[in-house]
Image: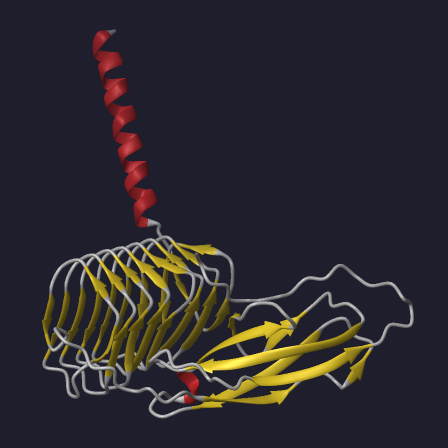
């Protein structure tokens, strides 16, 4: 009887361990082409030459961006790393958290802005323009052998800021570094100080009965490509908040409204003369819905 009990417990433990191992091995990898919203996935890959936009997505493992691919991620939560080798563009933006590191090698452009990164940000041997701005970094920021220009500005870095063999040298400033500022990043120069221009494209009619409106806009800047400009929107007297084109406001009240949009380049220069669009809502029913504003990308405090 004792042998039976011992075998039974041993067998049960073995089954539990096998089941656990099988559960680990079943972790799925999702391929993203197009758009992925507020869902939870295990691991995520952006395939070769593909394009993926994430908004509010939780990744319990790692994001991998393959050769020639593009990733734009807003308000994502990544438990592991964001890794790219040979990617065309990688953008990790406002409100995102990364439990591991952001590691971008031998690719094109990259932009990491207003992100909490628990480990390191690593840029190595990339050929496009790069920026790391307004981030909270638990480890190091390491910038080695990049050739498209690097902007490092207004970060809080618990480890070291290390920059070597970049051509041209990195620019930026106002970084709070608990460790050491080394080599090319020992004394960063300001670099680009010219603000971008914001261009409105489409909006609602000047007078409309609709209680929502959609706007499109773009901008121009040197050296930041228009595709890498960030934007902030303000409706009526509200504060500016991060937004993207197209941008929709909903649940408006009858009367006149004004939307302002301003572009922000990779060096954090703001357009001082925002684009403005004013329109009026006329309601025949006289009933006004509850006011709410749809802002797809909000700054994480």
Identify which residue is drawn at 42% across, 68% down: 73
- Using the image, determine if residue 64 lies above or below residue 169: above
Q: Residue furthest right?
A: 285
Quarter of the view holding residue 162: bottom left
Residue at 19% of width from left, 87% of height from top?
Answer: 147
Q: Residue lying farthest top?
A: 1
x 48%, y 89%: residue:
219
Q: Quadrant of the C terminus?
A: bottom left
Q: On the rendered structure, is 155 left or right of 95?
A: left
Percent x, y of residue 207: 80, 83
- Percent x, y of residue 58: 43, 56
Which colour assignment does the render follow?
Answer: secondary structure
Q: From what the image shows, is residue 220 above or below residue 262?
A: below
For residue 121, what is the image quadrant? Answer: bottom left
How far from the left and from the top, in percent, is residue 177? 19, 62
Q: Where is residue 296 in the image (x, y as percent from the top left)?
A: 55, 67
Q: In screen coordinates, is 205 left or right of 145?
A: right
Q: Is residue 158 visible?
A: yes
Looking at the image, how many numbered discs can be counted on the residues?
0
Q: Can residue 67 be seen in this view?
A: no
256 and 292: which is toward the camera: 256
Q: 130 left or right of 205?
A: left
- Name the residue located 63 percent from the left edge and 78 percent from the top edge: 259
Q: In which quarter of the image is the N terminus?
A: top left
Could you tell whether 257 is left or right of 32 in the image?
A: right
């Amino acid at each position: 009887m004792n042998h039976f009990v011992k075998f039974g417990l041993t067998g049960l433990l073995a089954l539990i361990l096998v089941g656990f191992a099988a559960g680990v091995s079943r972790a799925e990898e999702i391929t993203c082409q197009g758009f992925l919203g507020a869902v939870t996935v295990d691991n995520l890959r952006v395939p070769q030459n593909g394009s993926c936009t994430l908004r509010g997505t939780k990744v319990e493992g790692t994001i991998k961006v393959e050769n020639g691919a593009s990733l734009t991620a807003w308000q994502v939560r990544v438990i592991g790393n964001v890794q790219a080798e040979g990617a065309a563009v990688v953008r990790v933006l406002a409100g995102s958290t990364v439990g591991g590191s952001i590691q971008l090698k031998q690719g094109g452009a990259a932009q990491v802005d207003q992100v909490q990164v628990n480990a390191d940000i690593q840029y190595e041997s990339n050929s496009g323009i790069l920026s790391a701005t307004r981030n909270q970094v638990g480890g190091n920021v390491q910038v080695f052998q990049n050739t498209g220009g690097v902007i490092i500005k207004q970060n809080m870095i618990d480890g070291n800021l290390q920059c070597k063999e970049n051509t041209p040298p990195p620019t930026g400033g106002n970084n709070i570094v608990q460790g050491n500022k080394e080599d090319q990043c020992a004394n960063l120069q300001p670099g680009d100080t010219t603000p971008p221009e914001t261009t409105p494209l489409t909006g609602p009619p000047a007078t409309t009965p609709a209680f929502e409106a959609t706007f499109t806009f773009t901008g121009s800047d040197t050296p930041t490509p228009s595709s890498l400009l960030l934007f902030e929107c303000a409706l009526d007297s509200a504060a500016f908040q991060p937004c993207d084109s197209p941008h929709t406001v909903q649940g408006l009240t009858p009367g006149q409204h004004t939307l302002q949009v301003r572009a922000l380049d990779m060096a954090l220069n703001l357009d001082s003369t925002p684009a403005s669009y004013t329109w009026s809502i006329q309601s025949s029913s006289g009933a006004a819905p509850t006011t709410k504003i749809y802002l797809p990308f909000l700054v994480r405090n």
